[in-house]
Image (tube, rainbow, N blue to C red):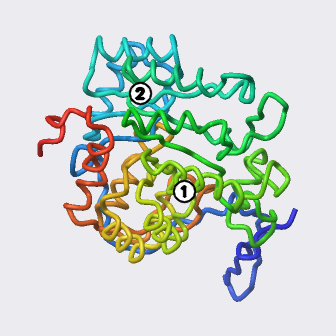
């Protein structure tokens, strides 16, 4: 397998001592090369967000009362007001999570329901799925989360790939619009996963360490097709509000993302798992946040408290050249956007309050 063209496979250090030249050679691949920057610049570690925030993109299978009590302590330390668990499930599993929340911290946690796509194409599937979703929402689910398996892995009753815009799913999107709850949807993955795994691929290291993430135009479909299917749904259901997870995989192309937001006024975007893309383009990203400040929501995805400060630092500080916490995601350095307070407040909680009216406004008094 080819190594990236821009990093060495052999580091050679020449040392001059006692009038002789000695050569020290060390075999080193991309994975091991991780130099400590010699750059000296101001550092502002931010352990707590400037304003109370809603994490609109979190995942927790365990929402027992004991676990919720543990989570609240960690949330308080970060100034996290509300955690939205997107792995709510459906039916009895969802009700168990909601009951635990109502018993302990009813204003600090929320769950989004999930749809079981098994059996799409069988008689009455759409009506049954919509009815179950309505029951879940009436019991306390505050939205619907769609995983990337739709478009990548799910098949219908005949074994055919289930497209994101399959018309048999329309009752689901319509039900969310009818009941006034948002749909947080993840479609596809970064476009680089579909591109040749060679020296030109910016995600080469991630694909090397996580080979199952590699995709092709036939496994299962071209990236552009899956993304277009998602946009077709947004346009077909203008009365339903959609939160496009991971900025719709356009965080590295904010000009295009801006056009898409202009075309689809019912689309919002979450920043979960794409903070490294924003941090490497501070001027353009800052302008984007200012221009689309009413359409961007804070989210983290994987819940690791030690990783949140990187998000705070990118959004709040004016720091230069600091690292991301996962080299295989981003081997480049990042910069702070130094967002205005009015924008930060909307990203941290204001936009979530618009989409989820049940949020307790008292939690966001500053």
Determine which of the numbered discs, if any, sits on residue 146 in the image: none
For residue 255, above or below residue 345: below
Q: Secondary structure at mark 2?
A: strand
For residue 361, above or below residue 354: above
Give the position of the N terminus as an image quadrant. Answer: bottom right
Q: Position of residue 327 (x, y in %)?
A: 59, 56
For residue 158, above or below residue 100: below
Query: Mark 2 = which residue?
Result: 111
- Marks 1 and 2 sit apart, C-alpha to C-alpha, by 22 Å
Total marks drawn?
2
In terms of image quadrants, where is residue 335? bottom left
Q: Position of residue 294 (x, y in %)?
A: 30, 59
Query: Mark 1 = which residue?
Result: 248
Left or right position of 326 against 346: right
Left or right position of 259 against 191: left
In terms of image quadrants, where is residue 97? top left
**Callout 1–callout 2 Cβ contact below 8 Å:** no
Q: Secondary structure at mark 1?
A: helix
Pick the residue in front: 137 or 10.
Answer: 137
Pick the residue in front: 304 or 132.
Answer: 132
**Residue plotted at (64% across, 58% down):** 228
- Neighbour class for label 1 at 10 Å: few (<14), some, many (≥20)? many
């Amino acid at each position: 397998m080819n190594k990236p063209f821009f990093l060495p496979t052999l580091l050679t250090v020449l040392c001059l001592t006692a009038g002789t030249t000695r050569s020290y050679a060390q075999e080193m691949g991309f994975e091991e090369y991780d130099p400590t920057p010699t750059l000296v610049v101001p550092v502002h570690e931010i352990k707590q967000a400037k304003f109370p925030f809603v994490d609109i993109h979190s995942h927790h299978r365990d929402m027992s009362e004991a676990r919720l009590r543990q989570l609240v302590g960690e949330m308080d330390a970060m100034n996290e007001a509300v955690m939205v668990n997107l792995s709510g499930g459906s039916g009895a599993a969802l009700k168990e999570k909601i009951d635990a929340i109502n018993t302990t911290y009813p204003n600090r946690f929320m769950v989004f329901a999930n749809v079981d796509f098994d059996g799409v194409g069988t008689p009455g599937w759409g009506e049954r799925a919509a009815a179950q979703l309505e029951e879940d929402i009436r019991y306390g689910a505050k939205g619907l989360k769609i995983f990337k398996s739709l478009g990548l892995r799910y098949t219908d009753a005949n074994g055919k790939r289930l497209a994101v815009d399959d018309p048999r799913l329309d009752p689901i999107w319509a039900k969310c619009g009818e009941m006034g709850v948002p749909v947080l949807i993840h479609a596809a993955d970064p476009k680089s996963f579909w591109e040749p795994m060679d020296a030109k691929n910016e995600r080469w290291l991630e694909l090397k360490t996580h080979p199952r993430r590699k995709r092709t135009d036939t496994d299962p479909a071209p990236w552009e097709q899956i993304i277009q299917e998602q946009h077709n749904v947004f346009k077909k259901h203008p009365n339903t509000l959609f939160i496009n997870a991971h900025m719709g995989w356009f965080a590295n192309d904010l000009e295009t993302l801006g056009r898409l937001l202009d075309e689809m006024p019912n689309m919002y975007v979450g920043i979960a798992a794409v903070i490294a893309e924003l941090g490497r383009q501070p001027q353009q990203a800052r302008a984007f946040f200012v221009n689309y400040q009413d359409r961007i929501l804070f989210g983290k995805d994987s819940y690791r408290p030690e990783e949140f400060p990187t998000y705070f630092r990118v959004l709040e500080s004016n720091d230069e050249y600091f690292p991301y916490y996962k080299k295989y995601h981003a081997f480049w350095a990042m910069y702070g956007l130094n967002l205005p307070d009015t924008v930060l407040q909307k990203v941290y909680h204001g936009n979530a309050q618009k989409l989820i009216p049940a949020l307790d406004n008292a939690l966001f008094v500053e």
